[in-house]
Image: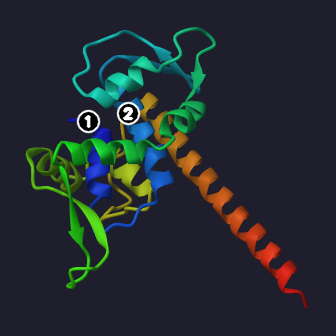
Amino acid sequence: MTTAKDLFIIASDPKHSVGQGDLSLALAGAELIDLIGAGAIAVDGDRIVPAGQPALDDPFIGEAAAGLTRQAPYEPIDDWLWRRGRDLAAAYQTAMEEDGELKQQRSGPLSFGSQRLQPVDTPARRRATDRWTDREPVLAALAATVGIDGERSDDEPGPDDEAVTTVLAAVHDAVMELEAVRQRRTIENAAYANLWRGP
């Protein structure tokens, strides 16, 4: 079980509405955190330094490890998030659908209502839900970054690993940057529409 997969399961809950771009960036960050936990990387300043090649059971984490830059000056965390995060949420969705861990669920009472994906009740989902219920600091921080706040209090402990904290801060900054890009496009599109509409 990985932090990234746990995050995807929590974000897939129909109660939550999470943007694919935000989630993709957070998943990339979660993979880095899992690689830190596995001893596969270290963080030096803002750069990802490969630290070993342990056996990694999860195919996504293995793929992430294989994509690391293994020569100095190494890759900055924010560059990694944007590169690795491209369409990552869609890749997790496809893999989990193929594994039978996600199913289509209609959102309305009518048979032609719109469909949403929902996690199937599996041991993986129960483990993710347990971590979420226990307010595990890393999962809670990643979820908050993509807009899932849950019942968080100010006195909850944060992660006690400096490298993990650095990655979480980078994920937060990347999601804020993505939101700034969205807002700028919205303003530009509105201005363009007004120009055509005329006085």
Q: Position of residue 182 (x, y in %)?
A: 64, 61
Indicate left or right for 174 with 145 as reference.
right
Which mark, residue 117?
A: none
Q: Residue furthest right?
A: 199
Res 36 visible: no
Q: Position of residue 62 (x, y in %)?
A: 33, 22
Mark 2 to mark 1 CA distance (whole Å): 8 Å
Q: Position of residue 46 (x, y in %)?
A: 58, 27
How are the colours assigned in the image? rainbow
Residue at coordinates 23% horizontally, 53% vertically from top-left? Answer: 132
Q: Amino acid at mark 1?
A: Thr
Indicate left or right for 42 with 137 as reference.
right
Q: Are marks 2 and 1 in contact (CB under 8 Å)?
A: yes
> The C terminus appears in which quarter of the rendering?
bottom right
Q: Residue furthest front?
A: 112
Res 186 visible: yes
Which mark, residue 31?
A: 2
Counting residues from the start of the chain, the first of labels 2 and 1 encountered is: 1
Q: Determine crowd level at label 1: few under 14, some 14-19, many 20+ residues with C-alpha closer than 10 A.
A: some
In the picture shown, does residue 116 fall above or below 113?
A: above
Describe the element under mark 2 as helix, strand or loop: helix
Q: Amino acid at mark 2?
A: Glu
Indicate left or right for 38 with 101 as reference.
right
Residue at coordinates 67% horizontally, 65% vertically from top-left? Answer: 183
The total of numbered circles placed on residues is 2
Residue at coordinates 28% horizontally, 41% vertically from top-left? Answer: 95
Q: Position of residue 3 (x, y in %)?
A: 29, 39
Q: Residue furthest bottom?
A: 199
In depth, the one of 3 and 9 nearer the eye is: 9
Describe the element under mark 1 as helix, strand or loop: loop
In the picture shown, does residue 55 fall above or below 162?
A: above
- The residue that label 1 is drawn on is 2
